[in-house]
Amino acid sequence: MKILVLNGPNLNLLGTREPEIYGTETLADIEMKMQTIYPEIEIEFRQTNSEAELITWVGETRGIFDGIIINPAALTHTSLGLYDALKAVADITPAVEIHLSNTHTREEIRHKSLTAPACIGQIMGFQGFGYTLALRALVHNLSS
């Protein structure tokens, strides 16, 4: 099984950016934990601050990856293009949306996700542990 983990804008700052909200783990820490827990799964991590690059990566998953875990970050609330890309591959490459914080407890603008309806599920509020939960849920879905 091959899973693509995509991370959007500013997640390269994870570990130092607002640790009271996002935690102190870096993306590298999260990736290492996922690899340790699921050594039998090929996990590829990517991060970009570019909406266009994220959309391109989603579109390239068909036939290469079995599933996607995506933290669109701020693009969650603004990117119809990312929604369209996720929807276009959903029949072959299902996605789980992940958020480090519980977006419903934050500013009102963060309450609505444009991208979640194109995903099979959404996990939020568990900081870095949410990625492991998302992987477990995606593996379960793909194995069903």
Image (cartoon, helix red, strand yellow):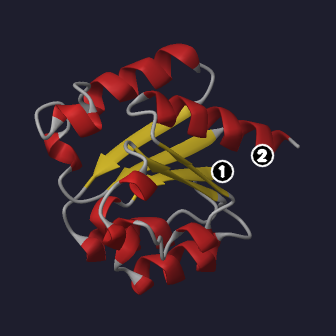
Residue at x 69% of width, y 59% of height: 120
What residue does disc 1 label?
66
User: Where is residue 126 drawn, in percent x and y?
Assistant: 46, 33
Q: Amino acid at mark 1?
A: Asp
Residue farthest toward the right in the current orientation of the protein:
144
Residue at x 28% of width, y 77% of height: 52
User: Where is residue 114 drawn, in percent x and y?
Assistant: 48, 77
- Please tell me whether residue 34 is drawn above or below residue 92 in the rendered image: above
User: Where is residue 108 drawn, in percent x and y?
Assistant: 35, 69
Along the line of sight, which residue is nearer the eye, 39 or 101? 101
Secondary structure type for disc 2: helix
- Please tell me whether residue 32 is drawn above or below residue 105 in the rendered image: above
User: Where is residue 107 drawn, in percent x and y?
Assistant: 29, 63
Image marks 1 and 2: residues in contact by CB distance under 8 Å: yes
Give the label, 1 or 2, closer to the camera.
2
Quadrant containing the N terminus in the rendered view: top right
Q: Left or right of 77: which side holds 11?
A: left
What residue does disc 2 label?
142
Q: Left or right of 100: which side holds 134?
A: right
Residue at x 23% of width, y 47% of height: 11
Q: CA distance from mark 1 to mark 2?
A: 8 Å
Q: Pick whichever of labels 1 and 2 is earlier in the sequence.
A: 1
Along the line of sight, which residue is nearer the eye, 96 or 18? 18
Quadrant containing the C terminus in the rendered view: top right
* Quadrant hosting residue 16: top left
- Please tell me whether residue 5 is drawn above or below residue 76 in the rendered image: above
| Label 2: how many Cα within 10 Å (few below 14, some 14–19, many 20+) | few
Q: Amino acid at mark 2?
A: Leu
Along the line of sight, which residue is nearer the eye, 14 or 93? 14
Q: Left or right of 126: which side holds 79?
A: left
Residue at x 26% of width, y 39% of height: 21
* Quadrant hosting residue 101: top left
